[in-house]
Amino acid sequence: FFLFFDGSAGVLPSISSLCPQRGQHLSHLLPSSLLGVVKAQTTAVAAPGLSQSAVHGKKVLRKGVVVITGASSGLGLAAAKALAETEKWHVVMACRDFLKAEKAAQSAGMAKENYSIMHLDLASLDSVRQFVHGFRQSGRPLDVLVCNAAIYRPTARKPTYTADGSEMSVGVNHLGHFLLANMLLEDLKKSDYPSRRLIILGSITGNTNTLAGNVPPKAGLGDLRGLAGGLDGRNSSAMIDGGEFDGAKAYKDSKICNMLTMQELHRRFHEDTGITFTSLYPGCIATTGLFREHIPLFRLLFPPFQKFITKGFVSEDESGKRLAQVQIPKQRSINDTQTLTIVLRFLQVVADASLSKSGVYWSWNNNSASFENQLSEEASDAVKAQKLWEISEKLVGLA
Ligand code: NDP
């Protein structure tokens, strides 16, 4: 089985590199009191859509407001749904396809008052700016930002480009989020919510200190010469390290950028702002759209491979069930173990007080306990993080 698929189609390296770990299951569950903990205020909050049981002179509790990019499918949608169902969070689903997101929210049974959808195409820096403008116009505060959206193009033979001319995987996964995070930092700073967080999804595949991270093509940013050239494929390479285009590597490189950016945000802003900056590897959901561009054989075999061989499969509904049982009594409808496990991890990072430490890349062990994972040498290289920051600032027009 392994040799066949490894040798014939490159399926095994792809599978094992993306979701390698066995039995990483959910640990302690966050106390329900911590989800959507709200700050007591003495005045009503005027933002639309907020819960306002305002009585003059009495404490007013408001919902937390969380923006999740790429909430139209997969992990982002499952987390949006789980948070919305607590009725303690208003979820802003920041999505490139408004109609798809609306349909997804409706078929997930999300109540209208618990979410809104705003257009965001991370493949266009103008769209990112417009999103931030529109969000501010909405009058909502921002308490948590989750940079979740991503594309993965492992079979692409040629690069494609964002509206601004950068290679698509790094453009969407890193540069779009880099601009968004920098702009929305101002809004997070203004929030009066007790725990403000900026979370960027990481991945084990970008970490070469793991078995999975050593499956070719390995992530590696080199001296960032391709990025410095704009990743435009003409004057510079479309790859960050200046090498030949490789779709799988571009995704892994973008994930190193995500993890370096989180640490640089922490170094630059945590002390002054108190905002928590974190990243996480939530485990593998073999059934999400992330793998939509992989070869059909991979998509066919990946979920059963995860389920029966690595036992690392975490279904969308299972993580929801655990959530429902222990953590959120009102959680109603995630029925798949794997997804529920992962969603719960996701929610811990969003709202659990025990995961409020900044600058951490969270992972979960076989006993479902969260722990501060060690990033690879490159993914924790402070000098490279600073250089990445400075180049990215120029590319997105912040410097
Ligand atoms: P999905 O493909 O299911 O979801 C990705 C989301 O990103 C979709 O909503 C998609 O929108 C959105 N997106 C893609 N391009 C853009 C864009 N240009 N602008 C705005 N949104 C965009 O993937 P997952 O849920 O699996 O992945 C979510 C995160 O988790 C990613 O960061 C991924 O790297 C990470 N992760 C996932 C793992 C897994 O096993 N699934 C493992 C480790 C990390 P649309 O619906 O319109 O396509």
Image (cartoon, rainbow, N blue to C red):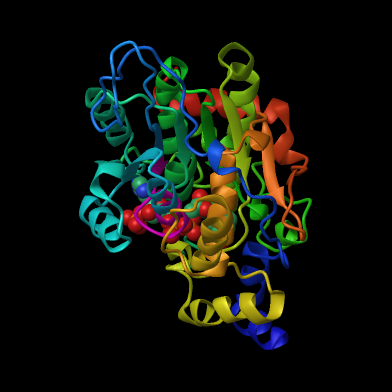
Quadrant of the rendered image containing residue 137? top left
Q: Is residue 324 magenta?
A: no
Q: Position of residue 97 (x, y in %)?
A: 26, 52
Label total for image: 0
Using the image as rendered, state which of residue 281 and residue 35 is in the foreground: 35
**Residue 97 as seen in the image, left or right of residue 220:** left
Q: Quadrant of residue 379?
A: top right
Q: Is residue 148 above or below residue 193?
A: below
Q: Nearer the viewer, residue 163 or 347?
A: 347
* x, y percent for residue 135: 28, 29
Residue name at image x 73 percent, y 68 percent: 22
Residue 161 seen from this side? no
Ligand 1 is located in which of the four quadrants? bottom left
**Quadrant in the picture for the C terminus:** top left
Is residue 128 at all visible to an observer of this figure?
yes
Q: What are the residue bounds of the magenta stretch?
A: 68-80
Q: Residue at x 24, y 47 (%)?
A: 112
